[in-house]
Amino acid sequence: MGNMTETSQVITRFAPSPTGFLHIGGARTALFNWLFARHHNGQFLLRIEDTDRARSTQEAIDAILDGMRWLGLEHDGEAVYQSARKQRHTGIAAQLLREGKAYYCYCTAQELEAMRETARAAGEPVRYNGMWRDRDQAEAPTDVPPVVRLKAPRTGNTTIRDQVLGDITFANDQLDDLILLRSDGTPTYMLSVVADDHDMGITHVIRGDDHLTNAARQAHIYTALGWDLPVFAHVPMILGPDGAKLSKRHGALGVGAYREMGYLPEAMRNYLLRLGWSHGDDEIISTAQAIDWFNLENIGKSPARFDFAKLENLNGIYMRDAEAETLMPQVVATIAQIYGEDPDAAARARLEHALPGLKERATNLVELAQNAHYLFAERPLKPDEKAAKLLNPEACAHLRALADQLALLEEWSAQTTEDCIRAYIAQADMKLGKVAQPLRAALTGTTVSPGIFDVLVSLGKDESLARLRDQASL
């Protein structure tokens, strides 16, 4: 069995089934294929495997495309829809029938069940026993619509030269004659995948290791058709932190859910890259570095473990490093998503000023947006429970006096406001915390915010004084 030559242009593909959202495992597969193609200046193609018409939905297709766009994994050329290629697939089955490499099988459901029972009783693998493989078609019953099966080799071995797992050998007598066309004439997944990968010129098939047995079976179709095999790279699955199969409780959510939780696409790309691939001890890997460094050799042979804490930490690093012009539109969109309205021009100006302080204290966009709520909250603010406790009569008396002192400032800056407040507490013989916490509560409605002097500058003189007087007079 030949493999694609190393000299041909690298062409990879991502081939999701549109029966649900783009999940973490699928997103990582797409990323690995995208990176490998970009590293080799090749092509990254998208194929929607929508042959299961009953379960495939437009909503799922849209979710997959949207998830890929958000992650920045743009595919080359038009997406290929597998269902549109049915005629080509059935034509290949007809060719194999003509060449005697496939045959009609007229087994009934009862006969197949009896085969399974016999195999189970003997402690053998459940597989088709080839009863119609060499049988005279003249014996065919007229009331049973046949399936078309491949005449797979029955002796010897099939070895898949895998770029991740090494050489994997399957005994051919353990692989039965797989179905190419169902009894209603529709092509099976196995046939469609081989035909599409060949026709699309796919050189490297990078996919989850749950497809490993499929690779051996698909190799039989390639051989029967006289086609070269692509290079295979089967990537171990992603497990939960506890080593169990990844489930929703671990984070097996759609990519869209991570977007809504406030993660940055570049942080998500970095995190998915490190789920099963490594480059020395590097943890923070930019997209440009990932393209430069990515190879199949560094994909781990063991399953990766999903770790929410690691993702959160990585996202925090990316947020702190993000340029304001990149972060601002995402923060504004998150604010609109949470609060149902866009901040106005004045609130945006405050947000821009407060952003450096806000991004230091948040690990995702949702947290940042919630921490920024004070910048565009309507007056009078409704302090949360903790903040309300700080606004006792004694604190409010200090706020009134402080507002009068701050009103006298001609220049409004972090330095002048700090000097004014420190002068006030020195005169009253108090510690800064005694005034700073009620100040924070009055200005933001919470007990957590950027530095209090930055808050004053972000809100501006008029808004700051108005908020202090609002709370002091309640």
Image (tube, rainbow, N blue to C red):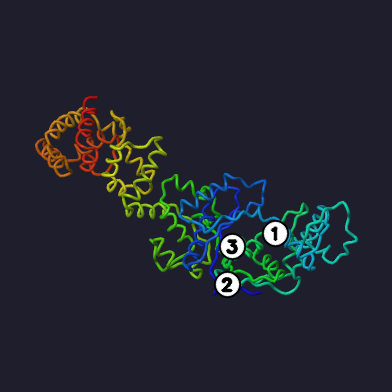
Structural distance between the alpha carbons of marks 3 and 2: 12 Å
User: Can residue 431 be seen from the camera position used here?
Assistant: no
- Residue matched to label 2: 166
| SS for dot 3 | helix
Q: Residue at x 52, y 61 (%)?
A: 44
Mark 1–mark 2 distance (CA, rounded to whole Å): 33 Å
Residue under label 3: 209
Question: Which label is found at residue 430?
Answer: none
Task: Please indicate whether residue 44 sits to the left or right of residue 468 in the image.
Answer: right
Q: Amino acid at mark 3?
A: Asp
Residue 88 badge:
1
Q: Nearer the viewer, residue 99 or 445?
A: 99
Q: Earlier in the sequence, mark 3 or mark 1?
A: 1
Q: Amino acid at mark 2?
A: Gly
In terms of sequence position, does the residue under pointer 3 or pointer 2 come before the other?
A: 2
In the displayed structure image, the side of residue 44 where residue 140 appears, left or right: right
Q: How far across and down, in percent of the image, does residue 113 sit?
A: 80, 54
Looking at the rendered image, the disc whose residue lies closer to the viewer, 3 or 1, is 1
